[in-house]
Image: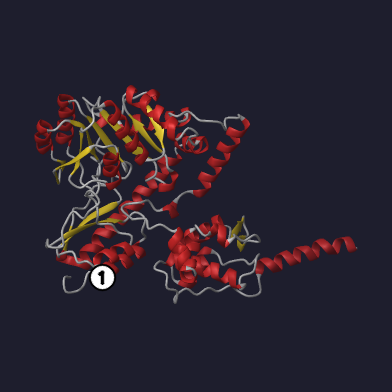
Amino acid sequence: MDGLKYPVFKTYMVQYIMQQPWKVRLHIAERAEKTIFFKLANQIIQEILSGRLLHGTRLPGSRTLADELGINRKTVQLVYEDLEAQGWLVSKARQGTFVSEHLPDLKSESKTSSTYALLEKTEPSMQQRQEPVIKNDGIPDTRLIPYELFSRAYRRALIRVTRQQIMGYGDPQGSLELRQALLNMLSMERFIRASLDHICVVRGSQMGIFLAARILAKQRPKGQVIIVEQWSYPPAVETFLSNHYQVIQVRLDQNGLDTEHLAELLEIHNVAAVYTTPHHQYPTTVSMSMDRRLKLLELSKAFDFYIIEDDYDHEFHYDSRPIPPLISLPSSEKVIHIGSLSKVFAPSLRVGYVVADLNTIQAMCQDILLIDKQGNSITELAIAELMQQGEIKRHTRKMRKVYQGRRDFAVQLFQQTFQDNVEFMTPAGGMALWVKFNFSYQPHYTELLMSLHIDSEYSFGSKPQKASLPYFYIRFGFAALSEIEMTQIIEQLYQGFNHVHV
């Protein structure tokens, strides 16, 4: 008889714990954080640290909590997922979400976004030392990453490299699996005719730019010129200057790089390469017209210079099919095409690629052996699997819809808020708006823009406009912001830009 009582008692206790006699309630209205996501995440962390939420405590379901707080259910789900990834919470199938029994160490886990937001109030010096200010110039929303798919792919990749004993130095050109997956994608989606030997995997597009500049510097006489667009990507410009190039600007308009002005520059300068972002020009977001693309390739052949094509966010084009990249067009023998998967998922993914002629790729591999001999075989295998299974394409298609909706919302909100004091062309694609304000730049705007992670510095590290001009520009990244977050930031811009002007 006694043997029957224990399982009955155990079952009763499990049901009691799961039911919880008192309902967990949370309150976030008075919190000072800027976003609902951080308000809720930090409130939960604070309740755990205070001891109010003990380990094993079951939290309300996402729908229930969203209804109680009057917020979007997706926000609650994202907070739960983020805190689970950090170790604060644990989810159990068909049971719910619980406070973890093994909480993270704040000292070692303080790099997480939610913990940073919490520490900002109690330890500002730590926050200032450890968290860099990252400009939102068009970054992806990392909260929307399919973490479960990633974790499974990484787990299988780790098992594979361990069992097959391939944890040693990787191929400097990148794993065969990832290059094959990239080749399939480039051929089917971007009309690029290449082979495995013409593809090199790099740690993001910036590494590709650096390698291209280094190789051309060795191949060409010193003192040569690299031409960049009138407003250009500052890290690329700094890379060219560090390799002792003279950097000259070519004019830019609503159709992209001005090829007539380029032809004039080519007549008087010994040009090694032209660096361009033709698909969604950085920072203005304009797309280079097809006639100018063909003209640029024609000039490359006639004047014997390379074209460094930075195709950093090709996947996100909304209003029509993406224009084929330069390297897919006739006379593209001297195009060095640089792409990245970082915009699809997160900047920290650091997976990019270069497509170029065989001599350029071989030279890149030699330089990679000097700076990145190990490579990252686990990440490459995981990404290759996700590409081969179609998961990356599905995620990209989903994000394209999300980002297009956010673009449209940002356009409407800027127009409603600033009315005649703002001008911009709605970009056909990309992850940012190039916004012109019809009043002069004031010194205190700099601090305001920095606090909102918005940049207005693009050309050679200095502002492309002076305070004396009756207008100025910003590049406003919309992809990483929810509608609530965008509303808050644009309202802060409106208030900070002084009602005298607005």
Q: Where is residue 161 in the image (x, y as percent from the top left)?
A: 58, 33
Residue located 37% across and 29% down the image: 364
In the displayed structure, 104 sits above or below 48; it is above
Answer few, some or many: residues within 10 Å of disc 1's Cα (few below 14, many 20 plus, some between 14 and 19): some
Residue located 34% across and 25% down the image: 194
Extreme bottom residue here?
30
Query: Does the rendering let one see residue 66?
Result: no
Task: Depth check: give the residue in front, 211 or 54.
Answer: 211
Q: Where is residue 198 in the image (x, y as percent from the top left)?
A: 36, 25
Q: In terms of secondary structure, where does tag 1 sit?
A: helix
Task: Depth check: give the residue in front, 87 or 184.
Answer: 87
In the displayed structure, 254 sits above or below 189; it is below
Residue 453 relative to residue 298: left or right: right
Residue 183 relative to residue 290: left or right: right
Q: Quadrant of residue 497?
A: bottom left
Label total for image: 1
Q: Quadrant of residue 363?
A: top left
- Colour scheme of the picture: secondary structure
Q: Position of residue 395 (x, y in %)?
A: 42, 45
The quadrant of the image that shows the C terminus is bottom left
Task: Depth check: give the residue in front, 228 or 282.
Answer: 228
Q: Quadrant of residue 159?
A: top right
The quadrant of the image that shows the N terminus is bottom right
Query: Does the rendering let one see residue 271?
Result: yes
In the displayed structure, 314 sits above or below 492; it is above
Residue located 15% across and 35% down the image: 292
Residue 15 relative to residue 209: left or right: right
Q: Mark 1 points at which residue?
A: 496
* Disc 1 residue type (three-letter): Gly
Residue 137 relative to residue 39: left or right: left
Q: Position of residue 269 (x, y in %)?
A: 13, 33
